[in-house]
Image (spheres, rainbow, N blue to C red):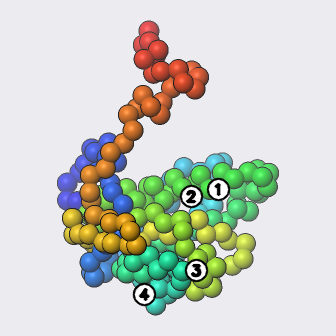
């Protein structure tokens, strides 16, 4: 996008894009996306994330050997989001899972930057982590949380996958705020909030 968007508008208009056109993503845009991820909040500022940019289509085709999701196999670019849990555990105890939340915040930042730059992307958690580790030579102690296929796309392009049909940038609905938000205790409506 070439215009500065209001933040809430940027958030509301971001969509999961699954069909990409065959056009490489410029390095400066990739760096801006990674920079957005790098500035995500993290517990104790431990920054446990590691990002691997992949443009090698042969490698990408190995990432989902079972379902063969076309948005995984046909993306022009992908970010593999990993974490080093020891970064968190050095400060907190080994049952602490905040590294997952930290990486999730980084993923959301990157998805918003992808959208801001006029690209599309999708957050994928179902794929063969074993195959990704092997293809990218990721050390054993590093965990893979997600992959983000992204690139240029055409609005309205349709992609069929099994019985599902995905339309790029299709409008989506959200539950009403009163269905998901409460005041002071679960189930207590937000209407109870008084601004004194």
Residue position marked by numbered label 3 in the rendering: 132
| Residue at the farthest front position | 163
Looking at the rendered structure, which numbered label has been put on residue 99?
1
Q: Nearer the viewer, mark 3 or mark 2?
A: 3
| Residue at the farthest top position | 196
- As drawn, 44 above or below 151: above
- As drawn, 193 above or below 117: above
- Other-residue count near label 1 (Cα within 10 Å), few / some / many at <14 / 14–19 / ≥20: many
Residue position marked by numbered label 4 in the rendering: 57
Q: Secondary structure at mark 1?
A: helix
Callouts 1 and 2 close, C-beta under 8 Å: yes
From the viewer's perspective, is 183 left or right of 143?
left
| Residue at the farthest bottom position | 58
Residue occupying image coordinates x 38% and y 68%: 163
Q: CA distance from mark 1 to mark 3?
A: 20 Å
Residue occupying image coordinates x 59% and y 65%: 145
From the viewer's perspective, is 12 left or right of 182?
left
Residue position marked by numbered label 2 in the rendering: 103
Q: CA distance from mark 3 to mark 2?
A: 18 Å
Q: Nearer the viewer, mark 1 or mark 3?
A: 3
């Amino acid at each position: 996008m070439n215009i500065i968007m209001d933040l809430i508008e940027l958030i509301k208009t971001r969509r999961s894009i699954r069909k990409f056109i065959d056009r490489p993503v410029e390095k400066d845009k990739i760096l801006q996306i990674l920079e957005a991820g790098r500035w995500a909040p993290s517990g104790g500022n431990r920054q446990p994330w590691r990002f691997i940019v992949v443009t090698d289509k042969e490698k990408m085709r190995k990432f989902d050997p079972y379902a063969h999701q076309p948005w995984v196999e046909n993306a022009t670019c992908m970010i593999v989001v990993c974490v080093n849990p020891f970064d968190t555990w050095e400060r907190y105890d080994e049952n602490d899972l905040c590294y997952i939340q930290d990486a999730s915040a980084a993923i959301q930042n990157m998805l918003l930057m992808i959208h801001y730059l006029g690209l599309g992307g999708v957050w994928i958690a179902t794929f063969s982590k074993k195959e990704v580790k092997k293809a990218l030579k990721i050390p054993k102690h590093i965990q893979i949380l997600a992959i983000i296929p992204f690139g240029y796309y055409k609005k309205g392009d349709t992609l069929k996958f099994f019985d599902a049909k995905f339309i790029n940038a299709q409008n989506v609905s959200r539950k009403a705020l009163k269905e998901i938000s409460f005041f002071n205790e679960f189930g207590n409506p937000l209407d109870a909030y008084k601004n004194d």
